[in-house]
Image: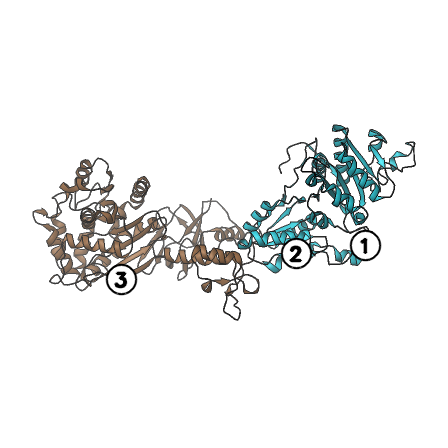
Chain colours: A cyan, B brown
């Protein structure tokens, strides 16, 4: 996408914060709810407010501007507040709920999948559920097995849910604006390792359309489809490969549901080779889904087997060396590319 | 600015030349146009002239060395210009010889993969990627013939494309053929150029000539067109049947040209005919218009009565080196084109067994002391094809006036009179010749 607006350098976390602020300013029905996002449910004054804004500071400063009625601290009850957000969405509000870590989805899956995701379908298109659920994914901070998974594949599997996986600050801002403005249930997966990463972010309130992949690097020799933080790993691998004369095209789908099939198929038609890089577990995953897409509709364009570079089929280990081994590295990606050239 | 002297391409089939001597040593001054070195090819020895005035700074190709066409043989610097050895090496590396370029390039390029025989499974199924199979189907390439560069001996789509391109290149590369005509006579043809070209061209030489009459221009046309140059019966490397058993008339020569067009699947071809070859081309276009897409008539016979009595004398005389020289002097306006090499070639051609009686038979059939017998000027109006007339202004064999009168009678025809040029403009003014024919070809209505 060609960004013509003026830009500023900011972090992924600041870009999300800015998108929330813009959405709340433009639409008074946008409310935020989640654990610790305002600064503690029992605190009724605003002293020391600099310390507030969620465990990662993503919602910092919003309660000061929009007040406690629009930035709601909730109890540690995912079933309760995700259910409340889904309910509020069906009755006129446009809530943005924060599920602190995606690993906790088990506590609130009925509210997400069996309720929110199905309303539009089951009420013949007459109901809508404009709720966005922000959640953290990703290994790399030694947060252990219950706070480090990706699991976006689980949600991608389910009809009625849109799944957004931004890899850059600019994408995070533009995609979150579109997610909030969307009239369906959107899962917005923020990679916690990326919160401090910086990038140029356009001014203004323009959203990035959901379902539009971005070619992060052009190349003719191999297509690497990489998801979320894996985009960065793939770009590093691509530079290594370029020094060897292999030009990789790195595609960031940006949303897994809807998926931009055409951009991927067109790229593979050009490069004749596909590597999918995914930090999620490998079975029945976004990676296998993309591989199946190309095997099905791009078979005659392939010159080599489709390769997947993913996490192993285990929970995320706590041990830092094991955790580093768990996440696909640029070296592994480059090795796999070399294998099929 | 330094000037790189390179190995010229003197003929369609020339790929390299051997340096046989230098007229100047390194460090000596050279003058533009003065002979600098001599080069021997498989067919000839000739001088290469200095392309610039200055100092012969470096002889790249010492006497005895073989250099590919376009390869550097020397570097001339302007007076006072100084070049380091590194700069010299850089210049040599960037010259156009295949295999010497890109030595200084630092950009990473994918290392070339060694092709090898494709892997097969127990059933004999070739290991080829899905894309390779699809491409092979599209390009009509047999996977069994393709070398594999992919992992595990797998043929990739790129391998298929490379194999297809090399077979296209092989088809486009010059080759010679002996075609057996229905009469049993075998004619020699040089064929070159892309098989999928927009036009096909057949070149027909004049009396006593051969396909080598077109050597100076054929490569230019073969770059974009499918071209063939034939040796007429009695000429060059074709059979030279006894006149008692073969009819050396213009009608029969035209029929031979038509048969060549058919056998080489060139129809409809642009037929380019020189002198007697022009008459044969014109006769063919009238007799069998479907075979002829257009006519280029170069100093053509059959367009008027006059014919040089000198030519008839030469044709009727016994072949000798002196006669060959006089013939060439008659052909060329510029005496510098009368080279020893050309005289030797002409003498050898006329002395070949059967050549002399064939030439005499044709000469007697087509010409007489009263002038040309075969006259087709009155029939030009029957032509359905576009025509380009070319003539040397100073042609002493067939006057340029014939082409002018002929062109006047055909409103759609093109006419090019080349100033200061004699009977053989494709040699004496080869670049002008190529340019006008190319322009005319481009003007042809799409078939």
Q: Which mark is residue B394?
A: none
Residue lying farthest to the left in this orientation: B370
Q: CA distance from mark 3 to mark 1?
A: 80 Å
Given residues A332 and B432, the one toward you in this image is A332
What residue does disc 3 label?
A: B178
Q: Closer to the N terminus: mark 2 or mark 1?
A: 1
Q: CA distance from mark 2 to mark 3?
A: 58 Å
In terms of secondary structure, where does tag 2 sit? strand
What residue does disc 1 label?
A: A145
Residue B137: x and y in percent read 45, 57
In terms of secondary structure, where does tag 3 sit? strand
Q: Residues within 10 Å of mark 1 (few under 14, many from 20)?
A: some
Is circle 2 on the same chain as circle 1?
A: yes
Q: Is A31 on the left-hand or right-hand side of B201?
A: right
Q: Is B60 on the left-hand or right-hand side of A158?
A: left
Given residues B400 and B331, the one toward you in this image is B400
What residue does disc 2 label?
A: A308
């Amino acid at each position: 996408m060609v960004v013509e607006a003026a830009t500023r350098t900011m972090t992924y976390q600041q870009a999300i914060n800015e998108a929330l602020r813009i959405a709340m300013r433009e639409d008074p029905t946008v409310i935020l709810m989640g654990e610790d996002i305002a600064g503690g449910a029992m605190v009724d004054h605003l002293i020391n407010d600099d310390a507030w804004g969620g465990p990662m500071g993503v919602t910092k400063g919003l309660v000061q501007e929009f007040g406690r009625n629009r930035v709601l601290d909730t109890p540690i009850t995912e079933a309760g507040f995700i259910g409340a957000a889904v309910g509020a969405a069906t009755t006129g509000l446009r809530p943005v709920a924060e599920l602190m870590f995606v690993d906790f989805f088990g506590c609130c899956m009925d509210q997400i999948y069996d309720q929110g995701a199905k309303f539009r379908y089951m009420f013949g298109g007459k109901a809508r559920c404009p709720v966005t659920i922000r959640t953290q994914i990703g290994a790399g901070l030694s947060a252990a097995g219950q706070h480090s998974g990706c699991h976006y594949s689980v949600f991608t599997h389910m009809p009625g849910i849109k799944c957004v996986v931004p890899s850059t600050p600019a994408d995070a801002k533009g995609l979150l604006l579109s997610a909030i403005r969307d009239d369906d249930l959107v899962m917005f997966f923020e990679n916690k390792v990326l919160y401090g990463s910086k990038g140029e972010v356009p001014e203004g309130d323009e959203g990035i359309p959901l379902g539009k992949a971005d070619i992060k690097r052009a190349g003719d020799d191999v297509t690497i489809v990489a998801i979320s933080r894996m985009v960065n790993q793939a770009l590093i691998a691509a530079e290594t490969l370029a020094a060897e004369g292999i030009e990789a095209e790195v595609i960031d789908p940006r949303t897994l549901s809807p998926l931009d099939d055409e951009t991927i198929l067109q790229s593979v038609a050009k490069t004749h080779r596909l590597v999918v890089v995914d930090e999620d577990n490998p079975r029945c995953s976004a990676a296998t889904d993309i591989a199946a897409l190309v095997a099905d509709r791009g078979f005659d364009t392939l010159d080599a087997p489709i390769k997947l570079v993913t996490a192993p089929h285990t929970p995320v280990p706590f041990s830092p060396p094991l955790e580093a081994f768990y996440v696909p590295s640029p070296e592994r990606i480059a090795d796999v590319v070399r294998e099929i050239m | 600015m330094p000037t790189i002297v390179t190995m010229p391409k003197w003929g369609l089939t020339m790929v390299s030349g051997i340096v046989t001597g230098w007229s100047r040593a390194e460090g000596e001054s050279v003058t533009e146009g003065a002979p600098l070195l001599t080069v021997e090819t498989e067919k000839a020895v000739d001088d290469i002239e200095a392309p610039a005035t200055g100092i012969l700074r470096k002889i790249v190709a010492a006497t005895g060395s073989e250099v590919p066409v376009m390869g550097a043989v020397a570097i001339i610097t302007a007076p006072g210009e100084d070049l380091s050895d590194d700069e010299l090496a850089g210049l040599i590396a960037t010259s156009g010889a295949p295999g010497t370029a890109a030595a200084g390039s630092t950009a990473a390029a994918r290392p070339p993969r060694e092709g090898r025989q494709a892997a097969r499974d127990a059933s004999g199924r070739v290991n080829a990627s899905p894309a390779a199979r699809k491409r092979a189907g599209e390009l009509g390439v047999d996977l069994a013939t393709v070398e594999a560069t992919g992992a595990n001996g797998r043929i990739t789509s790129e391998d298929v494309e490379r194999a297809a391109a090399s077979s296209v290149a092989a088809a486009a590369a010059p080759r010679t053929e002996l075609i057996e005509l229905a009469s049993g006579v075998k004619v020699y043809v040089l064929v070159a150029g892309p098989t999928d070209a927009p036009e096909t061209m057949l070149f027909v030489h004049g009396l006593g000539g051969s396909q080598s009459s077109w050597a100076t221009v054929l490569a230019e046309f073969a770059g974009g067109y499918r071209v063939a140059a034939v040796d007429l019966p009695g000429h060059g490397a074709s059979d030279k049947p006894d006149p008692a058993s073969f009819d050396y008339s213009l009608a029969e020569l035209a029929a031979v040209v038509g048969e060549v067009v058919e056998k080489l699947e060139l129809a409809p071809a642009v037929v380019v005919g020189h002198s007697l070859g022009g008459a044969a081309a014109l006769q063919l276009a009238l007799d069998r218009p479907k075979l002829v897409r257009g006519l280029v008539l170069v100093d053509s016979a059959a367009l008027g009565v006059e014919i040089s009595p000198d030519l008839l004398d030469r044709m009727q005389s016994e072949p000798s080196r002196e006669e060959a020289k006089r013939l060439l002097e008659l052909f060329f306006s510029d005496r510098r084109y009368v080279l020893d090499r050309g005289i030797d070639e002409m003498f050898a051609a006329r002395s070949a067994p059967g050549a002399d009686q064939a030439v005499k038979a044709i000469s007697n059939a087509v010409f007489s002391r009263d002038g040309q017998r075969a006259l087709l000027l009155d029939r030009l109006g029957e032509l359905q094809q576009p025509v380009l007339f070319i003539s040397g202004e100073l042609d002493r064999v067939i006057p340029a006036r014939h082409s002018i009168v002929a062109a006047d009678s055909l409103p759609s025809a093109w006419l090019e009179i080349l100033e200061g040029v004699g009977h053989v403009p494709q040699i004496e003014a080869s670049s002008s010749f190529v340019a006008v024919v190319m322009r005319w070809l481009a003007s042809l209505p799409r078939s």
